[in-house]
């Protein structure tokens, strides 16, 4: 993995909010849909140690879910993590 990747569902409110936040910050991301893919969802659950969506990775670092992403943004750390110099 590299860059920013969101693993989530198409209609989940926190998945939608995470995509919106990244777009607002001008951060490009890969959007991987887990809808209907039980094996991939189980793999992401195993990697993240979490059962919720979205699960977000930035530069091979597991960030967590939407609340974690929003907290990074509120601290002013999101853009520098996603777009290192």
Image (tube, grey):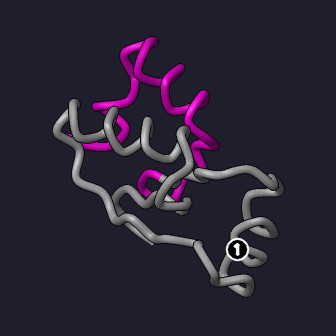
Extreme residue toward the top, this view:
75
Q: How many neighbours does mark 1 have within 10 angstroms: few (below 14), some (14-19), or many (20 or more)? A: some
Tally the numbered discs.
1
Please provide percent x and percent y for residue 60.
Answer: 50, 60
Q: Is residue 23 above or below residue 47?
A: above
> In percent of the image, x 40 and y 23: which residue is there?
77
> Residue 63 lies in what quarter of the image?
top right
> In percent of the image, x 22 and y 31: which residue is there?
25
Please provide percent x and percent y for residue 41.
Answer: 70, 74
Q: Is residue 71 above or below residue 6?
A: above
* Magenta highlight on residue 64: yes
Highlighted range, magenta: 58-85
Residue 84 seen from this side: no
Give SS at disc 1: helix
Closest to the observer: 32 or 1? 32
| Quadrant position of the C terminus in the picture | top left
Disc 1: which residue: 41
* Magenta highlight on residue 73: yes
């Amino acid at each position: 993995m590299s860059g920013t990747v969101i693993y989530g569902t198409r209609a989940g409110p926190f998945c939608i909010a995470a995509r919106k936040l990244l777009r607002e910050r001008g951060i490009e991301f890969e959007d991987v849909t887990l809808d209907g893919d039980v094996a991939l969802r189980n793999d992401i659950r195993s990697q993240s140690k979490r059962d919720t969506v979205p699960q977000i990775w930035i530069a091979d670092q597991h960030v967590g879910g939407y609340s974690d992403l929003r907290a990074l943004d509120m601290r002013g750390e999101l853009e520098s993590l996603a777009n290192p110099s």
